[in-house]
Amino acid sequence: MYYSKIILFVLFFSISRLLSQSLIVGIPSADIAEKGNIEITHESQVNFFQKPNTWNSFNFLCYGINPRTELTLAFNNMNNEGSTNLSLGLGGKHVIPLKKNDWETKITAGGNLLYSIPRKDVGYWLYSHFSFRVPKLKTRITSGLSYGTEQSFGFRRQTTEQGIITQTPIRPLSVMLGFEQHLFGNVSLVADWYSGNHDLAALIAAVQFDIKHHVLIFGYKFPNNMKRENEAIVLEFMISLPTRKK
């Protein structure tokens, strides 16, 4: 409850104009937090189709240090099941614009040092992708690779013949794909996907609303393993806070 109150307080008491988004839904985007701004994102994944109901959350803070680079702080996997994989992440993201043209081509690279709070061990997450925007249609396509440790991607749980539950760390090399399409007004269609079989392996399709200095995302998670208990309604909220007057 203590962490939830802090998150809600920061999210709802703020003023600024939103200029970028550091996530599409679940994968990093090709955008960077504006220099001097702090971006705060909270994502909840809720499944009330199964009993018991499940809730899991991802929380990110990004600070723009220049037009191409941001620092990131993450607090992930806070849930209603005991948070066995609760983790902190500290890292950054850097974007390299390529030749200036209507395609807005970019290369993005980033990473996080991860710390598991329950297990008190350390891991990491590295990623890089290429993106472009189709002229006139303004469709942005993103494609890249991600590699990380169990602090982010979880464990493979198995039960032995003796009834003992074992946990094998998952350290996958995954493909990341992203899609962003403006529809009309302040409404866009967004989607992203991780390949593989791990905690993040899923397609998330969503509708995005840009409302002044806020971004609201409503979507649905389709897990790669197609298990009903891993499906979820996805709700995401992001806001940008200036740290200095312009």
Image: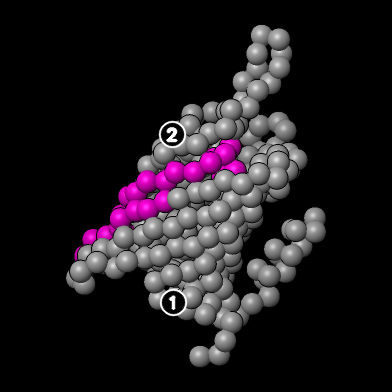
x, y percent for residue 32: 43, 69
User: On the rendered image, what quadrant is the N terminus found in?
Assistant: bottom right
Q: Residue at x 76, y 62 (%)?
A: 5
Residue 99 versus residue 220: which sits nearer the camera?
A: 99
Residue 37 vs 189, above or below: the answer is below
Q: State which quadrant residue 147 falls in.
A: top left
Left or right: where 161 falls relative to 124: right
x, y percent for residue 137: 25, 62
Query: Circle 2 sits in a helix, a strand or a loop, which is it?
Result: loop
Q: Nearer the viewer, mark 2 or mark 1?
A: 1
Range of magenta residues: 127-154
**How is the protein colored in the picture?**
one colour
Numbered circles on residues, count: 2
x, y percent for residue 31: 41, 66
x, y percent for residue 111: 47, 55
In reply to whether residue 172 is colored magenta, the answer given is no
**What mark, if any, has residue 196 been given in the picture?**
2
Alpha carbon separation for disc pair 2 and 1: 34 Å
Dot 2 crowding, Cα within 10 Å, few <14, some 14–19, many 20+: some
Q: Residue at x 45, y 62 (%)?
A: 93
Q: Label 1: which residue?
A: 66
Residue 182 versus residue 65: which sits nearer the camera?
A: 65
Which amino acid, by three-letter code, is at mark 2? Gly
Residue 16 vs 234, above or below: the answer is below
Q: Is residue 222 visible?
A: no
